[in-house]
Image: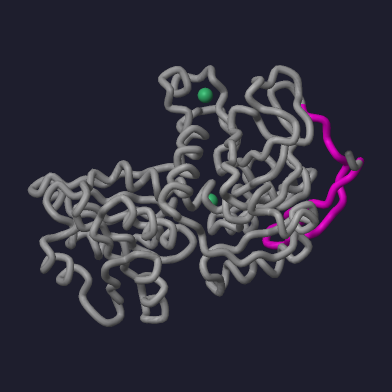
Amino acid sequence: MKTTYRAVQVTRPGFLELVERKTPVPGSGEVLIEVEACGICGADAADIERADPALQPPRVPGHEVVGRIAALGANTPSIWKVGQRVGMGRLGGYCNECSQCRQGHFQLCQNQPIVGASCDGGYAEMMLARATGLVSIPDELSSEEAAPILCAGIATFNALKKCGAQAGDVVVILGIGGLGHMAVQYARRMGFKVVAVGRGSDIVEDALALGAHLYIDTHQENAVARLQGMGGAQAIVTTISHADTVSSLMGGLAPQGRLVLLGAGKDPLPVSAGHLVVGERSVLGSITGSPYENERTLDFSVLAGVRPMIEVMPLEQADEAYRRMKSGDVKFRMVLSMGSARARQPNSRHG
Ligand SMILES: [Zn+2]
Ligand SMILES: [Zn+2]
């Protein structure tokens, strides 16, 4: 194994720098991953722009990580082997001791690192990871394809499972970007009548090609009136956190409909208590999910032919890749590819 590796760190808030670091030795319960690919999630912006400037060494962002186990620390479960392809999403491994873990709510563990925020992530050739956070990657998916499923995929797939809609019901996907383009595909394959809602007409063909039955451009028409004309939506899954945009669509929710929030915005969300009570509507938040649920998401993606639409750039261009994601100039997910990944092409689909 190489004694050093390349990593991209937030040297100061908003500034990504390629550096060389000493290869670490995994501690108890940890593995060392040789990273092959890492998606650039919208949530990375908060980790990069609001990084702690005093942190040493600076944080490595990235929480859609796929690679191979390079070394096992002590006390790791026998299901994980050196050379095995694994992934890691936003949740960095549960503790198995807190009250949420003891109830089996691993995604709600109170002692769980947030990858790329409270522990180093995957904009790097190597990454340490808690074994409890590891996800097994199916052979059918390339590392570049699998990476975005570990956050954008599971976040939307789990939200759709919790949204209460049944096959044939109208389900709205609000915001067609990195998360939304996965949500549309899953919703279609789960048997819903899929309505994609966005701003502008530039995205309409993509939304329909991904599986939406209908696209509503809020610049062109009144989305609430259109949804009410369809009998209302049984669920609205929103991938954006802009409070006014989300609350303005709530009038399109059918009785007993659910608004599922994925964007972790901090602004208060205005909701009408009467609208909730009289129609028995509800609002819920959904975090990504546990490693087991992440494996279910990957398996469903293979089963149903769901793939992220990706653009791939090399690790050394992480800064440019990040800026393109931030500007909205990516259809639909930017993925960083490490040298190890490029070396194994063109057989990546089978590795
Ligand atoms: Zn994410
Ligand atoms: Zn816990």
Residue at image point 63% right, 55% down: 144
Q: Closest to the observer: 44 or 135? A: 135
Q: Is residue 18 above or below residue 286?
A: below
Residue 251 lies in the magenta stretch: no
Q: Position of residue 228 (x, y in %)?
A: 12, 65
Q: Closest to the observer: 188 or 313? A: 188
Identify the magenta region.
Answer: 3-26
Residue at image point 18% right, 50% down: 257
Q: Is residue 104 above or below residue 251?
A: above
Colour mode of the rendering: one colour
Residue 14 lies in the magenta stretch: yes
Q: Main secondary structure of the magenta part?
A: strand
Residue at image point 76% right, 54% down: 344
Quadrant holding the N terminus:
top right
Q: Is residue 256 above or below residue 28?
A: below
Location of residue 2 by image quarter: top right
Q: Is residue 59 left or right of residue 283?
A: right
Q: How many numbered circles are shown?
A: 0
Q: Position of residue 274 (x, y in %)?
A: 11, 51
